[in-house]
Image (cartoon, rainbow, N blue to C red):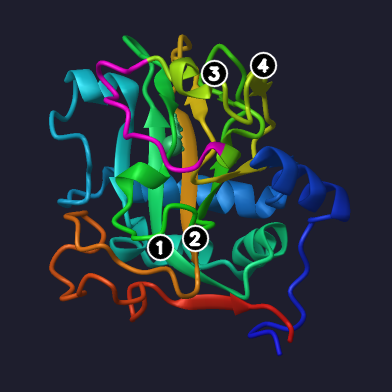
Amino acid sequence: MNLHSKIQTPITQDHIDFYRENGFVQVDNMLTSEELAELRVYLEEAMQTESDRSLAADQKGGSYYRVLNQKINLWRDHAGMGSYSFHPRFAQSALELSGASGMRFFHDHGLWKMPGDSKATPWHQDTPYWPIQESEAGMMSIWITLDDVNEDNGCMAFVPKSHKLGKLTGIDFLNPQNIFDYIEGGQAEGQKPVIVPLKAGSCTFHNGLTFHYAHANSTDKPRRVLAIIFTPDGVTFDGKEHPVTNGLGLKAGEPIAGPRFPLLVKANV
Ligand code: SIN
Ligand code: NI
C-alpha cells in the first residue's frame, strides 16, 4: 500500500525508460504556476536566512561562491520549504523512475548560480560526496528550476549512460579533473553530453552516478534552483563526515533512517 495512494505524477513509461537507460531525464511542468510563484517566495526567504547551513566556506565573493551559492536543509529554517522538500509528488516521481521499494528524503539544497563573476559547475558525479556505503545505491536528485534556464544562465548537461560507470572519484570543484578520462573505455564511451534548457517550474532527475555539469551564469540575475536528494530505503551510512549526518549519532553500517530522513513514499506491493 502506498503511503499516499492517490499521488499523481507527470511520469510516463517513456520517462522511466529514458531515466533507466541514460541516468537522467527531463520532466516538464513539475510545478503548477501557483506553486512556482509560492516556491520563489519561500526559496528567496530561506536563502536569505542566516544559518550555518550555507555550504560555501568562503561566502560572498570567494572562489567557491562563484561556482555555487548553496544552502542545505532549507526545510529546517523555513516551514514553507518543508512542504516542497517533502512534497509527495516529487518523491513519488523519483520512486517511479528508480523502481525502488521506498524513497527517503536525504536532504534539500538551494543551488543559486550568482550573476557577475560566475563559474560553471564542473563535471562530476554526486555519489562520491555522500556518506553512504553502497557504490550503486540508486540515490538521485530532482533539480527544479525557478527560472528559465539555458546555456547563458546555468542550465545543466548530462553524459548519457555515465551512471553505468559506477562510483568514481569526487571532483575538486575549484580544480576539476577531466572526467572524460574516466569515461574512455567504459559503457559511456562516445556519449556526447546532452544540454538541457528548461522552463521555470520544470525539472530534471539524475542518478547520483551520472556525470553532470552546469553552465556559468552570464546574465545579471541569479539562477534559482531547488534540488532534493532522495535515497532508496535501506541505503547504509559509511561513517564519513557530512553536514547532513554529522552529530546525529548514526553508526557506520546502519541504514539512513530517522526523523531527518523520513520515508516519503513506498511502492505498492
Ligand atoms: C548546479 O546547479 O549548478 C549543479 C547541480 C548539481 O551538481 O547537482
Ligand atoms: Ni551534482
Tell me, yes or no, whether the highlighted magenta stretch contains residue 166: yes
3D distance between C-alphas at marks 1 and 2? 5 Å
Tell me, yes or no, whether the highlighted magenta stretch contains residue 194: no
The residue at which mark 3 appears reads as: 184
Element type where label 4 sits in the image: loop
| Numbered label attached to residue 190 | 4
**Among the 4 quarters of the image, the one containing residue 97:** bottom right
3D distance between C-alphas at marks 1 and 3? 32 Å
| Numbered label attached to residue 174 | none
Element type where label 3 sits in the image: loop
* Type of amino acid at the residue the image marks with label 4: Gly
Contact? badges 3 and 4 (CB < 8 Å): no
The residue at which mark 1 appears reads as: 106
Q: Is residue 192 left or right of residue 259?
A: right
Badge 1: few (under 14), some or many (20 or more) residues near its Cα, within 10 Å? many
Q: Main secondary structure of the magenta part?
A: loop
Q: Position of residue 207 (x, y in %)?
A: 56, 46
* Type of amino acid at the residue the image marks with label 1: Phe
* Type of amino acid at the residue the image marks with label 3: Glu
User: Which sits earlier in the primary sequence, circle 3 or circle 4?
Assistant: 3
Q: Is residue 54 left or right of residue 72?
A: left
Q: Which residues are magenta?
A: 165-177
Element type where label 1 sits in the image: strand
User: Which sits earlier in the primary sequence, circle 4 or circle 1?
Assistant: 1
Badge 4: few (under 14), some or many (20 or more) residues near its Cα, within 10 Å? few
Quadrant of the image for the C terminus? Answer: bottom right
Q: Residue at the far front: name it.
A: 185
Contact? badges 4 and 1 (CB < 8 Å): no
**Among the 4 quarters of the image, the one containing residue 108:** bottom left
Contact? badges 1 and 2 (CB < 8 Å): yes
Q: Residue at x 26, y 62 (%)?
A: 238
